[in-house]
């Protein structure tokens, strides 16, 4: 064996062992000596990508393409052209990407027989449909590509195309069909049948689909699998930021807030970009908000927005917690108005309903409840159904229908228990306590309030804990919230829609006296306007 043959054998071994730094160094040295064929140059491209070096990856792919062209091998050259286009598109160089797509397509024009490269040629078309919001067309094209992958038993094409098809189905609300396809895709990935770069790309795309559609069970399982896969490759740079960001969200949902913050901070240190960076900042913001660290939450929501993500619905909830109800209403309304697809709307609606109920915009809240309930029926996703039941229960209590609210909130509690999400479970118990209090069942309300308080205390959710303490105090006193009997009387009339002048006439008091009573009521309830006081009075059974 010659020295070059030995060096090439060592480089291929390092590649198979996923020793990316060693493979990159060895293959780069051979490439500089012009000792690599196009197939091994593709290995260099993969090693470059796994080390986070996209420019070197594109350079190696370009050389592989030209090697195939020089060797009169148009089919593999076409496949490499499509990979180059994907790499350029990921860096925002869409014009160059379009040129490479055209180049690859022209290479396939003389091909008369079916081949796997024709399947790869369909993937850029599916991507264009996705960017244009044409989900039905995206599903059709990627389904055709996936069938070609099955026909030619090409696991890479099948995995890439099928996960794209599933993502389209998720946006169309066809969750059952989508997750059936994703389960098939993950069998290929977990069995290590795909190339390393394809494995990482599919992991991230599938997990992003799970998070977009709030499929917590699969997201938890596959995030752990991604963590294990990354952990077997010490040199790996690509995909680790997505892994950390996904883990951060799972840990937050499961109530391990300290660990979730740690993973988000690690994602920052890995210089995460794009979706992963935005997601990590959003997870931080949510935890800071629920802990009552509002200034830090503000900074993190801003960080999510600056990195191309959304700060909603968390930012609207922050404004509500800060007492800025007008800003909360305005921002959540705008967010829902701009949400133009099903998955974006279903993520915004729970916060929208919460803000509208809390600020007394019950007609708006009712429309949100109706839409969320319809989406939950369509998708069948457990988290969507729990959100729908929670929102509908809170809205019915605020609307003076606690008897209708209680069964819905018990349904929500069962849903959150099944998913194992303690914060959402505590919030549902809090709402059930309000419904029971409004029905006059003080003892049962107290049980729910105490269960919610204990959960909030364990999580470190201080604002929620203080809120439930007020409700517990109100449930156990003849004078809820410290209101005098006259203030309770004024609050009841205020909640009926009476003006201060009408209340004064009714109680045979001066309007100035009523103004003072209303100001005291606002202060004791911790609200800033009549609509919020009315909503809280109804939810607490005071009106």
Image (cartoon, grey):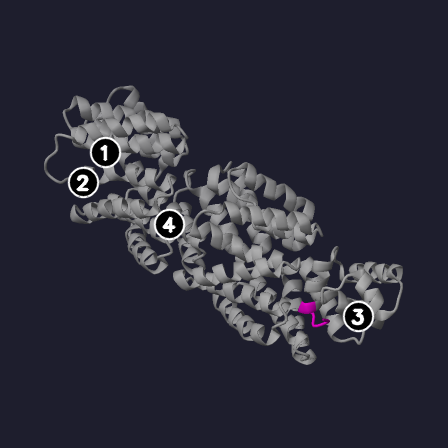
Residue 451, picture quadrant: bottom right
CA separation in Å, label 4 and label 3 = 54 Å
The residue under the point 16% across, 28% down is 74
Residue at the limit of the structure toward the left, as seen here: 112
> Is residue 382 shown left or right of residue 137?
right
- The numbered dot on residue 488 is 3
Counting residues from the start of the chain, the first of labels 4 and 2 encountered is 2
3D distance between C-alphas at marks 1 and 2: 9 Å
Q: What is the magenta range? A: 538-543
On the image, the x and y values in percent for residue 425 come to 56, 66
**Mark 1 residue crowding within 10 angstroms, few (<14) / some (14–19) / many (20+):** many
Q: State which tag comes first along the sequence, 1 or 3.
A: 1
Name the N-terminal-most of marks 4 and 3.
4
- The reply to whether callout 1 and callout 2 are in contact (CB within 8 Å) is yes
State the image coordinates of residue 206 (x, y, percent, origin top left): 37, 50
> Which residue is pictured at 48% across the width and 37% down the height?
273
Name the residue nearer the viewer: 47 or 141.
141
Residue 79's mark? 1
Q: Residues within 10 Å of mark 3 (few under 14, many from 20)?
A: many
- Tell me which numbered mark, 1 or 2, is placed earlier along the sequence: 1
Q: Specify the quadrant that holds the C terminus.
A: bottom right
Pointer 2 residue: 116
């Amino acid at each position: 064996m010659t020295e070059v043959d030995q060096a090439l054998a060592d480089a291929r071994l390092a590649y198979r062992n996923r020793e990316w730094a060693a493979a990159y160094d060895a293959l780069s040295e051979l490439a500089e000596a012009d000792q690599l064929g196009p197939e091994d140059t593709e290995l260099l491209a993969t090693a470059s990508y796994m080390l986070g070096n996209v420019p070197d990856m594109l350079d190696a792919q370009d050389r592989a393409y030209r090697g195939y062209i020089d060797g009169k091998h148009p089919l593999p050259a076409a496949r490499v052209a499509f990979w180059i286009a994907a790499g350029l598109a990921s860096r925002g160089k869409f014009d160059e990407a379009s040129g490479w797509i055209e180049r690859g397509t022209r290479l396939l024009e003389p091909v008369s027989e079916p081949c796997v490269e024709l399947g790869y040629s369909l993937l850029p078309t599916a991507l264009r449909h996705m960017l244009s919001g044409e989900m039905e067309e995206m599903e059709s094209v990627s389904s055709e590509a996936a069938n070609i992958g099955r026909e030619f038993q090409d696991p890479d094409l099948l995995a890439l195309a099928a996960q794209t098809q599933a993502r389209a189905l998720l946006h169309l609300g066809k969750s059952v069909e989508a997750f059936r396809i994703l389960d098939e895709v993950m069998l290929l990935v977990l069995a290590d049948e795909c190339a390393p770069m394809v494995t990482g790309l599919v992991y991230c795309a599938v997990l992003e689909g799970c998070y977009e559609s709030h499929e917590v069970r699969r997201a938890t399982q596959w995030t752990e699998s991604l963590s294990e896969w990354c952990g077997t490759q010490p040199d790996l740079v690509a995909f680790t930021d997505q892994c950390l960001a996904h883990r951060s969200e799972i840990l937050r949902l499961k109530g391990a807030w300290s660990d979730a913050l740690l993973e988000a901070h690690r994602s920052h240190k890995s210089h995460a970009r794009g979706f992963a960076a935005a997601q990590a900042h959003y997870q931080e913001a949510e935890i800071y908000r629920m802990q009552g660290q509002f200034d830090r939450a503000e900074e993190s929501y801003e960080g999510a927005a600056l990195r191309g993500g959304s700060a909603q619905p968390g930012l609207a909830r922050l404004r509500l917690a800060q007492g800025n109800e007008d800003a909360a209403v305005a921002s959540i309304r705008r967010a829902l108005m701009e949400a133009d697809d099903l998955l974006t709307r279903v993520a915004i609606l729970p916060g929208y309903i919460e803000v509208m109920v809390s600020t007394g915009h019950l007609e708006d809240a009712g429309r949100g409840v109706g839409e969320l309930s319809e989406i939950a029926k369509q998708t069948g996703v457990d988290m969507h159904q729990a959100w729908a039941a929670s929102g509908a229960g809170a809205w019915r209590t605020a609307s003076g229908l606690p008897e209708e609210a209680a069964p819905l909130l018990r349904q929500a509690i069962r849903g959150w228990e099944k998913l194992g999400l303690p914060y959402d479970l505590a919030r549902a118990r809090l709402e059930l306590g309000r419904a029971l209090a409004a029905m006059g069942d003080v003892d049962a309300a107290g049980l729910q309030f105490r269960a919610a308080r204990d959960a909030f205390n364990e999580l470190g959710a201080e604002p929620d804990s203080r809120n439930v303490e007020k409700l517990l105090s109100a449930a156990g006193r003849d004078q809820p919230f410290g209101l005098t009997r006259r203030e309770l009387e004024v609050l009841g009339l205020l909640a009926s829609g009476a003006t201060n002048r009408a209340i004064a006439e009714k109680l045979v008091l001066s309007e100035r006296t009523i103004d003072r009573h209303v100001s005291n009521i606002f202060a004791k309830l911790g609200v800033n306007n009549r609509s919020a006081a009315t909503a809280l009075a109804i939810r607490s059974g005071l009106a």
